[in-house]
Amino acid sequence: MITTTYQVQGMTCGHCVNSVSTEIGAISGVSNVAVDLASGQVTVTSEAPLDPATVRAAVDEAGYDLVNA
């Protein structure tokens, strides 16, 4: 398993956390998504390395901005 941490901007509430978790969690191979609202950090556990463009698209779909990928 691989764990990667991303920085997401724009999250302000529990609904934001749920949206980001749902979109990233739908990526094939993702087994866990943990979001720290206070820091904006999203830690993703997956079976293999994720394509940064795929993660960015998922965060965009949720309505937020991926700072690093």
Image (cartoon, rainbow, N blue to C red):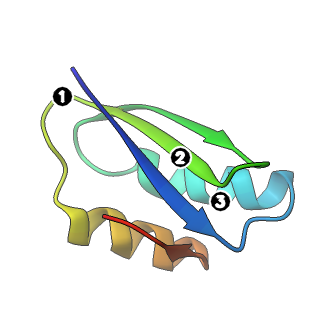
Disc number for residue 68: none
Mark nearer the N terminus (3 vs 1): 3
The percent position of residue 47, horizontal first and vertical second, equals 18, 28
The amino acid sitting under disc 1 is: Glu
Q: What residue is pinned by disc 1?
A: 47
The percent position of residue 29, horizontal first and vertical second, equals 22, 37
The amino acid sitting under disc 2 is: Val
Q: What residue is pinned by disc 2?
A: 42
The percent position of residue 22, horizontal first and vertical second, equals 55, 51
Q: Say few, some or many: other residues with alpha carbon within 10 Å of mark 1 (under 14 / 14 to 19 / 20 or more).
A: few
Who's the residue at 33% across and 62% down the image?
A: 55
| Measured Cα–Cα span from mark 1 to mark 2 | 16 Å
Residue 10 lies left or right of residue 30; in this view the side is right
Q: Say few, some or many: other residues with alpha carbon within 10 Å of mark 2 (under 14 / 14 to 19 / 20 or more).
A: many
53, above or below 1, in the image: below
Q: In which quarter of the image is residue 46?
A: top left
16, above or below 31, in the image: below
Q: Is mark 1 on a helix, strand or loop?
A: loop
Who's the residue at 19% across and 50% down the image?
A: 50
If the image is split into quadrants, where does the C terminus sit? bottom left
Who's the residue at 39% across and 50% down the image?
A: 26
Mark nearer the N terminus (1 vs 2): 2
Who's the residue at 60% across and 76% down the image?
A: 64
Q: Is mark 3 on a helix, strand or loop?
A: helix
The answer to whether the residue labelled 2 contacts the one labelled 3, judged by CB atoms less than 8 Å apart, is no
Give the number of the mark in front: 1 or 2. 2
If the image is split into quadrants, where does the N terminus sit? top left
Residue 49 lies left or right of residue 68; in this view the side is left
The amino acid sitting under disc 3 is: Ser
Q: Quadrant of residue 49?
A: top left
Q: What residue is pinned by disc 3?
A: 19
The percent position of residue 36, horizontal first and vertical second, equals 69, 41
